[in-house]
Amino acid sequence: MTATAPAVTPAAVRPRGGRWQRHAPAALLLAPLMAFMLIFYLIPIGQMVGESLTYWSGDAVEDKATPTLYQYEKTLESSRATGSIVRTFRISLLSVAICFLLSYPIALWLLFAGRKLRTGVLLVVFISLASSLIVRNYGWLVVLADGGPVNNLLIALGLTEFPLRLTYSEGAIITALVHYGMPFMILPIYGSLLRIPSSFWEASQSLGATSMRTLWRVILPLSMPGVFGGTMLVFAVSMSAFVTPLMLGSPSTAMVSQVAAEQLLVQLNFAWGSAIMTTLTVVTLAIVVLYALAVRKVFRVDV
Amino acid sequence: MSERSPFRIALAALAWASMAFLVFPVILTAVVSLNDSFFIEFPPKAFSFRWYENIAAIHRIGEATLISLTIAVAAAALATVLALGAALAIARHPFPAKPAITAFLLSPVTLPMVAIGIALVQFFIAIDAAFTWWSLAAGHVVLVIAYPVRTLVASLTLSDTSLEDAARSLGASRWTAFRTVTLPQLKPGMVSGFLFAFLISFDNYPISVFLVRGDLTTMPIEVFNYISNNFDPTPAAFSTVYILVISVVIAAAEYRYRIMSLSIPRS
């Protein structure tokens, strides 16, 4: 700021009025969106949680007056529900790990690439981010098909005599989730790498560190905010995966969203479907919060 | 670190391999879409455009695409307008609980989509507005809101407030200064926010599947149903057209508005 005051004082530095007067512009600007989100987001989610606390079991008399944990007990007792929660967690962890290993090199490489190459690679990343999930999953159905390239390669190499059934499996789901998550992983990591001054590389190297050691001891810790953002997003997206397991999985690889959607769309059991979905949301958010706290403690970065 | 160091060579090799993984399915789909065979086979044997002609055979694909287009335009436009106000408040004004409110507006991205779908269908049934174009559009605004909020906060943070102050000191009214100085600076943020909101809405399956019924359907739902019930390569032809259109749109938007740099989160 310069010492000379501007001819017109901006709203932020006007003499203090009442609390309302000071925050009036912000309140007015925020009001339309907040009202919309209250009606179409917060209230419906609240109602869903309320619905999950009702006693309804298809043949019993409805009793919505007293909240009950009946639906949650049912979730814990159902091996299909608990099994899908465990499976969803396992698939998500594997997807995040593989996605990170594939994405970090791309983000780091973008840092050293020339302008033309960087624009080209970023365009490919953005196009895959913007292209349809159904289209991309279909691509994996083609790649992993019985007569597809992977099977034909395996046969040509003599590794198998007959085509393997690669689709409709957990492996196919993880492959597609990794593919879906890559843009979400690459962009925040690249963004945080951009903020690291190039002098840090030079300083580390001139002090005798190898490139690998520089990456491990300097660059990786400093890019942690981006790593956290990317891994958190890919984890959340994988935990709530629905279309991907529908297209590339089978009934025996059902993930949580599928089990809940079945209850709603097929059984018309809104209460139990809501309880399963509320459980998934709470579990996912709890893991993300714990993860954020762990990253803060270990790397001492603000995420 | 030199261009030719083992580290750089290894890094480039890893990155190229990962990029191959990213584009492999797309290229394969295009190859299969041009193959005459009814079954998915690789390598292809005979060239044919017949699967492209067969796109029209996808049940109600025309109507569904039209509904998807109107929903995506409406949801993206409303989300961008609502997000502009919120982003101005977040970027330019101090107010209590700012981080919490910002997190709340970005939260639909991290919440399971099926949860949003289930919550919305019950809500719309309760207020007797379920399975209408309007309720589907409202649901899609919730789905896409985070994108314009994020890009507009980013471009407001980058924009120069002193220009607006200069306009005001030269006698422009608050509104005129905003309209003629600030708004043009926000154009890239608005374009990229609108574009991503549009594309996310146009492609959504998990929320729409709960909010449609009868005549109300969307493009992803019809394509998904076709893939579930048929094994011919028609969806490959459809996918190839889709990717080509998206590529042109993204490349044009980048060339004209530099949308990519705004959409890279810099935390």
Image: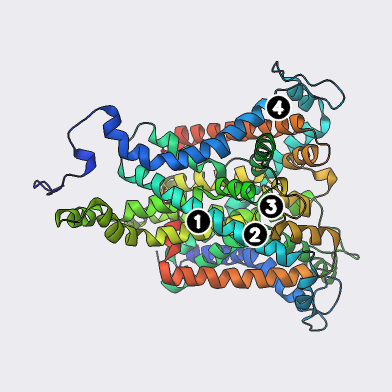
Read off the residue under disc 4: A52
Which circle's residue, 2 or 1, is located before the other in the chain? 2
Question: Could one spot residue A221 in this view of the protein?
Answer: yes
Badge number at residue B77: 1
The picture places residue B37, in percent across and down from the top left corner, at 85, 77
Where is residue A154 drawn, in percent x and y? 81, 66
Q: Amino acid at mark 2?
A: Ser
For disc 2, the chain is B
Q: Chain of mark 1?
A: B
Of the two numbered discs 2 and 3 on the same chain, state the one appearing first in sequence: 2
Number of callouts: 4
- Residue A234 vs B36, above or below: the answer is above
State the image quarter where residue B240 is shown: bottom right
State the separation of the CA atoms marked 1 and 3: 20 Å
Question: Judging from the image, what secondary structure is the residue with disc 1 in?
Answer: helix
Callout 4: SS: helix
Three-letter amino acid code at the position of disc 3: Tyr
Residue drawn 77% across and 61% down?
A: A141
Task: Look at mark 3 in the image and give the residue it sits on.
Answer: B205
Q: Is circle 4 on the same chain as circle 3? A: no
Q: What is the distance, in whole Å, between disc 4 and disc 3 at their CAs?
A: 23 Å
Label 2 – label 1 distance at C-alpha: 14 Å
Near mark 3 (Cα within 10 A), the count class, few <14, some 14-19 or many ≥20, is many
